[in-house]
Amino acid sequence: MLLNDAFKLFLADRESYCSAKTLVYYHDNVPRFFGYLFDCLGQDAGSLDCSAVTRSHVTGFVCSLRCSGRKNTTVNTYFRAVKVFLNYCIEEGYCDPDILRKVRFLKNDAAPVVPLSGPEVDEIDGLFNWNTETGMRNLCIIHLMLDAGFRSSEVVNLRYSGINFNGNYLTVKGKGDRYRSVLLCPKLKRMLSHYLIRFRSCVPGDDYPVFARIGSQQPLTSDCIKQLFARVKARTGIVRLHPHLLRHTFATSYIMGGGNLEFLRLMLGHGDYDTTRTYLHLAQEAKMRNSDIYRLDSVFFKSVY
């Protein structure tokens, strides 16, 4: 099997369950490895057989990225896409089963995650007016991430049918088109009720997105949320602020409050415990710093903080 043909089959396979964003990630990053192979072997992916790729090529690719001066986290981002593709090739019998043996990710050199404190959240909330459509919409967006652990893409994907005010839960489609439910705490419930009743009472139907651009029915996009956070960051001076930090804050605060790891995994939509367990580490770090972390509603806990 030629490498390029294997990649086309890999992408076709992933189209059945991966998001468009994930497909773009593979499409952008796996060819970096093909370029490295061309430099080594003088053959492009359209003429190189998968069986010609060896473990030394994989380790050499990682070393070349590291020697280029890129951060370890960036190297890992590039290599992760290649590793998923090569695992697919191993499963399909296209290449040597030992091609990834003992090829490890580099040690994470990212800056430590410092969750938002209660006063920082108060400062962010103070930027928005409950009596305006823009202010109420933005508050709902922020607290869906902060009080329900939503990703920015999931905020965009939230539909009217995904809000159950009577049952006090939210349902959203996350990564891999998997649906999950999250508790709707009283604070977020008040915000969403106020926003929907006052500013979004006339909508096309239950499957319509909850959030729209001001003065139109045009759905909000992830770029709009990035722009929102850029403005909030500039106005508050919280330099570490970005959309995913709110999800980190939700998860870390949940652990610090005594929350159950399995419930957290389900609420975050993680496929396994490996990712969820990172919040145990973040919670311990926050406790050592005596962090005044933003506190979740008591509805999430049997015993509170």
Image (tube, helix red, strand yellow):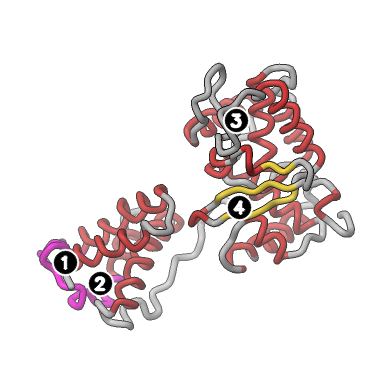
SS of the residue at dot 4?
loop
Viewer-nearest residue: 264 or 56? 264
* Separation (CA) of disc 4 from disc 1: 37 Å
Q: Which residue is mark 2?
A: 57
Q: From the viewer's perspective, is the residue at label 4 or at label 2 nearer?
A: 2
The correct choice, above or below, for 148 with respect to 266 in the image is above
- Which residue is labeled 1 in the image? 40
Q: Quadrant of the C terminus?
A: bottom right
Circle 4 sits on which residue?
112
Q: Is residue 158 visible?
A: yes
Quadrant of the rendered structure where residue 233 is? top right
Q: Would you name the residue on which mark 3 appears?
A: 233
Q: Residue drawn 70% across and 23% down?
A: 127
When the figure is inspected, residue 229 is found, relative to residue 285, above or below; the finding is above
Amino acid on which the number 1 mark rests in the picture: Cys
Tell me: 242 left or right of 73. Answer: right
* SS type, badge 2: helix
Q: Is residue 132 above or below residue 75?
A: above
Q: Marks 4/2: CA distance?
A: 32 Å
Contact, mark 2 vs mark 3 (Cβ under 8 Å): no
Per the rendered image, the range of residues in magenta is 37-58
Of marks 4 and 3, the one in the foreground: 3
Do the residues bearing badges 4 and 2 touch, measured as CB atoms within 8 Å?
Answer: no
The Cα–Cα distance between marks 2 and 1, rounded to whole angstroms, is: 8 Å
Please report whichever mark, 4 or 2, sits nearer to the chain's N-terminal start: 2
